[in-house]
Each structure stands twice: as structure tokens, then as C-alpha cells.
Image (spheres, rainbow, N blue to C red):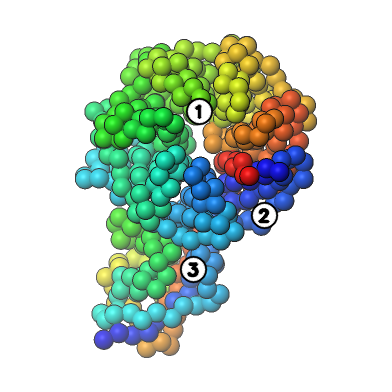
Amino acid sequence: MSRVRLLVGTKKGAFVLTADGMRKKWEISEPHFAGWEVYHAKGSPLDPERIYVSQSSSWFGQVMQRSDDGGKTWKAVGNSFPYEGIPGTHQWYDGTPHPWEFKRVWHVEPSLTEPDTVYAGVEDAALFKSTDGGQSWKELSGLRGHDTGPHWAPGAGGMCLHTVLLHPAKPEQIIVAISAAGTFRTDDGGETWRPINKGLQSAFLPDPAATVGHCVHHIARHASRPDTLFMQKHWDVMRSDDGGENWREVSGNLPTDFGFAIDVHAHEPETVFVVPIKSDAEHFPPEGKLRVYRSRSGGEEWEPMTSGLPQENCYVNVLRDAMAVDTLDDCGVYFGTTGGQVYCSPDGGETWSAIVHDLPAVLSVEVQTLP
Amino acid sequence: MSVHVRMELPAPLRSLAKVKSAVVLEVEEPATQHALVSALEERYPMLRGTVRDLVTGERRAYLRFFACGEDLSHLGMDALLPEKVIRGEEPFLVVGAVSGGL
């Protein structure tokens, strides 16, 4: 029988949660890297026993870890992320120039084709690539060196490159998202990049339809339709059907179109999940009700999925990398909260239950479907 | 020429390096803070960049250096270690800012 393995990054360590294909009975590991922030952990699609982890701390900086046995043991690998050349400046919150400074790795994305290749999205925003299993990292500097780079500015969470999408059929195409610069695409393996933000509207910008400056929170796609992208933006849920060239809003009847997490059903490319969050400042579910909204029409029409989720007095957040889907026949959907709960729906969002209630604040959730 | 220096690390770094107590490091002379941290990183590669910034080479902002009852944090990485530390009579302490974070 197939198994699933959840990789949960939290404010105080990483946890590995495992279950068989029924997804009813879970084993929860002891904390890995206890006391450290684990922004993200992700396994290689080519070798699921290989897992990369971003481990960081305000005291001790960035450490990268790699496991080659499915998370049983770990080895610290390269943690040097040098910007190419003279880094220069981007904009600070007040619009003044501010030096580019590496702070942490927000997201790791193992290659779909090369077992030893992995990408890292970092703060201050840049994309790094390793071709030796994480031992050494080289910046794909054409991104940060784009003409608009000096005009990028951070969102409140920092100027982070948090989303890396690798095209399943075109290895040279990579899409990344940066808060608060927007979405960028390369079609030559990372040498050159261009903004792909046409159709995005951000009311906080002097020009709401500006080329860059949009606070994109997360982007998801289905592997069978790689040119269709679903985006949760600071405000608005957006959709593109041409690889990001053009975007249109599909927020429809959502109770609020703000949120962080978004994902696509493993077997239904038009089924999308979001968790609406109240903003600008609150960042908790509207009305104290934790609801996953599901669209089976690729957006516009959304239905609340509430069975098993708290429907009163719930004031947690669900962060951008904290939702994932497995690939079992009945698609499992997972998300973690800043209150330390990790929820599982083994039936495509119909019903939910908490795998665990009391972890540290969850920063990220990834799932591996294992034979 | 080299000397042997006993270094006390904060618990998270002991855990990362998989050591239970102070580490004893062989430090090339002149025995500066820089030479000591280099010896630490050579002996324990997983600690590279955790005590000093990888780009600037400076002590991390949330860490302090103490020895012999003195705060050595602001002497600079080129400062020589105190004589009693070099003779192995006193440890060199790396201390994290108090608080475990949220």
C-alpha cells in the first residue's frame, strides 16, 4: 500500500509525519533541528529519500541540511549564498536605496530532471542553484540583475523569493515569485528573466498595473497543464492560461480574496484550493471560521469546505508554503497553521481532521507520496 | 606554532556540531578571534557561518564573546586572545543573546 510522508517546517524545528494510504493513523517524529526556524523542507521527485531543509536562526544565520534516507539522518551542506558581483541596492520600505543582504532561504525546489540539482529562493530576493546536492550554490544573477531590480521593495515579511515553479516539459523554463516585486520567468535556464505581471492590479502602487511591485503570495499549477497558473496575491486570486503572460482575476464569490496558500488538486486540473484570510492587518480567517475554499471550475465559483475544521473562535493564519496535495487516488490535501495544527483531508477537501494540534507555528508543509 | 583553546558554545551550536561540552581547538598563532573561529569552522564544518557572517567575516550580531570575566565582543576579529585563554587556563565563551525567540 502507498504511504505518505509530510515534511512540516515550523518556527522551532522540522517534523516528519507519516501514514499509510488511508491517512488515518499518523506517526509524528521528534523535532528535527529543534529551536531553529525551518522555513521549508522538500524531497526530490527523483529520489524521495533525498530531502533538503532550510534551517535558520536570527542568532546563527543560515544552515542547509540534506537527508539521503528519508529524514532519518541529516548532513549539513553548503550555506554560502554569495550574490554575484557587487550586489548594489534595491528599494527599502521608504523608497530609499538599501544594500542587497542575504538573510535566509525561504524555499528549496529540487530539480525534476537532475537528482543533484536543487534551487533555493532567498531573502533578499535571488535564486540560487546547486548542481552538487546542495554543497555549493551559485546565483542565477540575471534575475536580480534585471533592469527593474533596483526598484524592487520588500513586503512586510521581507523581500523574499518564495515560489519556484519548474516546468515539467521545458527544463529551461522557471517561474519565480517575489514579495513584493511580482512574478518573473526565464526561458533559458536562468540566464535572462522578464516580469510576467500583466493583468495584476495592486491598489497600493502609484500605478496599480505597474510592471513590477506586486505582492504575489504564492503560485500553483497542475503538472498536466503547466501553462495554467493559479496565484494567490496580496489581494486577488488570479489565473493565467499562457504561462503567466496574461492574468485575470478569478476571486469570484470568495469571502475575502486575500490569503497566502493556494494549491491544485492532483488529478483535477481545474480544482483549486485557497484559505481566505482577513487583512490588511488581522491575518486570520474571517468570522473566526477556518474554511478551505474549493473551486472545481478553475476559479470564480468557490465553495467552503468546513467539515472537521473549527467554525468558531479560530484566529490562526495559513502561510504561503503551508499547503500541499498528495497524489493518491483520492487526493489528499494538507495545510498547517500558525497555531501549530496540521490538517489532512483524505478526500479532496470534503472532510478534515487534525493530524496534530500543538506543533510550533507552521511555516511550510510538503507531502511525498511513497510506494 | 599553534596553541590549544577551550571554547564554550551555545546549546544550539553544540547540538548542530553533535558535541556535548566545550570543544578544544588547535589554533594557529597569532591566536586571534579570527584564527579561533577559523579553527572551529575547520574542525566542525557544519558550524561554518554560524558564529561569524560568511560575507563580512564579523561576529554575528546576536552573539557575544567573553573570556576571563571580560567582554571581548567589540575588540574586533583581529584581536589576540587573552593570555589565560591561550595557556588553556580559561575558556573562550560564545554567548547568544538571552531569549529563545517566539
- Name the residue rendered at 41%, 16% in the picture: A242
Question: Quadrant of the rendered structure where residue A274 is?
Answer: top right
Amino acid type of the residue tagged 2 in the rendering = Ser
From this view, report whether residue B37 is shown above or below residue A197: below
Q: Position of residue B71 (x, y in %)?
A: 40, 71
SS category of the residue bearing label 2: loop
Answer with left or right where residue A166 lies relative to residue A10: left
Chain for disc number 1: A
Residue for badge 1? A223
Residue A29, numbered label: 2
Report how far apart the C-alphas of labels 1 and 3 lie in the structure: 40 Å
Residue at label 3? B17
- The quadrant holding residue B5 is bottom left
Q: Residue at x 35, y 49 (%)?
A: A131
Which tag is nearer the camera, tag 2 or tag 1?
A: 1
Q: Position of residue A194 (x, y in %)?
A: 30, 25
Q: CA distance from mark 3 to mark 2?
A: 21 Å
